[in-house]
Image (spheres, helix red, strand yellow):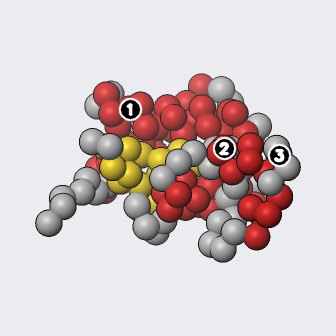
Amino acid sequence: MKMKPMLTVADVDTLLAAARAEAARNKWAVSISIVDDGGHLLGMIRLDGAGLSTVEMSREKARTAALCRRESKHYEDTINNGRISFLSAPLLKGMLEGGVPIVVDGMTAGAIGVSGVKSPEDAQVAKAGIAALVTGT
């Protein structure tokens, strides 16, 4: 039987706090979602001033990253490079940059998705959350 890493409530708290701090440092109003490896929501926050649509977009970016085991940016790039058939991919609604898988020991434990600012900035916030989890800071 293969063992796999799983996110704990403490991990979700760490991810949300670090991502939230990165957004606050930059004065970005975003929504941040954390999902498990199956794309199921574990934690979420919509910061003051973040648009209502950012809630679902952050969740879907995280879900896409978790289910596909890669950054959601991959699909945005694929579509922008002409492979528009990906727009019909079942179950994938967050195919924009800002969803980043959380990889532990080579396995995806979940993902974080951010929405509310430019896509590279969303990804920056997501990666700050993951960095805190990995380094323990």
| Circle 3 or circle 2, nearest the eye | 3
| Circle 3 or circle 1, nearest the eye | 3
Quadrant of the frame with the C terminus = top left
Kind of residue at badge 3:
Asn
| Secondary structure of residue under mark 3 | helix
Residue 93 seen from this side: yes
**Are circles 3 and 2 on residues that touch, CB within 8 Å?**
no
**Are circles 3 and 1 on residues that touch, CB within 8 Å?**
no
* Residue 108 drawn at (x, y percent): 38, 52
Per the image, the residue denoted by label 1 is 132
Q: In the rendered structure, which disc, 3 or 1, sits on the residue that comes first in sequence?
A: 3
The label number, if any, that marks residue 80 in the structure image: 3
Q: In the rendered structure, which disc, 2 or 1, sits on the residue that comes first in sequence?
A: 2
Kind of residue at badge 2:
Lys
* Residue 71 drawn at (x, y percent): 57, 45
Quadrant of the frame with the N terminus = bottom left
Q: Which of 57 and 109 lies nearest the eye of the viewer?
A: 109
| Secondary structure of residue under mark 2 | helix
* Residue 65 drawn at (x, y percent): 54, 53
Q: CA distance from mark 2 to mark 1?
A: 21 Å
- Which residue is depicted at the point 29% across and 50% down? 10
Q: Which of 19 and 27 lies nearest the eye of the viewer?
A: 19
Q: CA distance from mark 3 to mark 1?
A: 31 Å
Q: In the rendered structure, which disc, 3 or 2, sits on the residue that comes first in sequence?
A: 2
Q: Is residue 47 left or right of residue 83?
A: left
The label number, if any, that marks residue 73 in the structure image: 2
Q: Which of 99 and 76 lies nearest the eye of the viewer?
A: 76
Residue 21 seen from this side: no
Residues packed near mark 3 inside 10 Å, few (<14), some (14 to 19) or many (20 plus): few
